[in-house]
Amino acid sequence: MPCRFITLLLSLMLALMLVMGCSQQTTTPDAKASVDYNRPLPRGHAPLRKITDHADMPDTTLAWSNRDIFLGDAIDRSIEWYDAPSSKQWFPVCNITHEQAQASAVAMRELMRTTPDADEFNQAIRERFDVYESVGCDDEGTVLFTGYYAPDFHASRTRSSRFNTPLYTRPDDLVTHERDGTPLGRRLADGTIVSYPPRRTIEHTGMLRGTELVWLEDPLAAYVVHVNGSAKLRMDDGTILYVGYAGKTDRKYTGLGRTIVDEGLLREDELSLPAIRRAWKKDPKKIELLIHKNENYVFFQEYDGDTWPAGSLGVPVTPERSLATDKSIFPRGAVVLVDTDTVTLSRGSRSFVQFMVDQDTGGAINAPGRADLFMGIGPTAEILAGGQYAEGKLYYFFLKPREVQAMKAKTMPIAGAN
């Protein structure tokens, strides 16, 4: 994630993602407990299914009417990413080639700019694009959409009584898959690879001493940064530092909110980041013990403010236009359509049918039934991210192969192709 690979990784769902780890409607607490949104993709199964029945197509009319300049900016950033030769290493995926993914983003951007009305846009989609649906958590397309944001904390380069909890840089012995970045474990001196030590061991043995990037005020603040994958840090010397995801261990992710509910400290309908902070102030040792139940650990690096908050593609993410998914199974940089509900600042809900761009990942986003909406930066975004917990559908748009060839044949080349 440079976000969250930065996202890996959040209020009712900052908490519920902090927190926890298929009809489209806002999900009730009773329903939450009965659905395994984190069900791994079965071996040999594809995460995307091409839609062949027109009745199953998403509402591109509404999504087209909801487009804006920010969507255009987000697509442009994906196109820039595709232009870089390094982006080719992530393809093919889901039988989508790099050339096809790149051409699809260019073509979709042009359609957004030039089609005069939704009817013409829809016709172009039907004629030129194949539309794919995520199989979701149940092979019926059910996806849980949570939210994340870019937090803002005080920090220091130096340990003190106030700043006593570190964020660590990526250790040299962390091994990840060379192609997709999946964490594999820890490389020992003899070359063997074993599972990385759990969170508690990392934090209490000093095994990473000397690799601290910055120090935060308490373990809960550090954990929030871990979950979201990036942060804006107000340093004690008056400067601003931006940090983002540099890798994570191979250990299992367990959400803090789920653990707090299981322990009986809060009911699900009470769960929010402010409520977790109150519980922390009341009994910090107890909450820290629960934090340690999440054995997964995230590492960080500095980022230029011009690109922060950056997603796993290394480009800035855009509020309500950038999406985080499991990048070990889904194509990077693609234009998608999200059909779900989102929360309002008054804790109501609204229909959310929008084109977005798949530009990020996250520690808790590790299955076809999970996706994370980027809500923005700071306190308002925290409220929106924290309340986001709703089922929905996720669709991907890729040019038909003949259309890719037609674009190649034209005098105007695909951006970045050479």
Image (cartoon, helix red, strand yellow):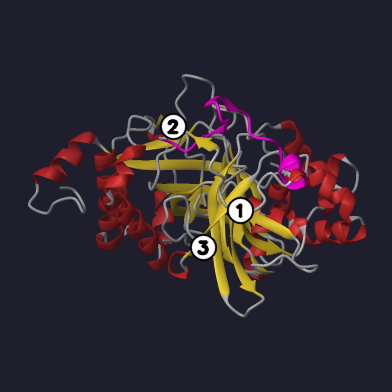
Where is residue 214? Give x, y as percent: 64, 62
Q: Which residues are magenta?
A: 179-204
Q: Amino acid at mark 3?
A: Pro
Number of residues whose C-alpha sits closer than 10 Å to that of mark 2, classed few (under 14), some (14–19) or many (20 or more): many
Q: Is residue 412 left or right of residue 44?
A: left
Q: Are marks 3 and 2 in contact (CB under 8 Å)?
A: no
Where is residue 332? Give x, y as percent: 40, 44
Res 174 visible:
yes
Res 266 visible:
no
Q: Residue at x 40, y 36 (%)?
A: 132
Residue 280 location, quadrant: bottom right
Q: Is 348 part of what is drawn in magenta?
A: no
Q: Which residue is mark 1?
A: 211
Q: Residue at x 82, y 60 (%)?
A: 277
Q: Nearer the viewer, residue 365 or 185?
A: 185
Q: Earlier in the sequence, mark 1 or mark 2?
A: 2
Q: Which residue is mark 2?
A: 48
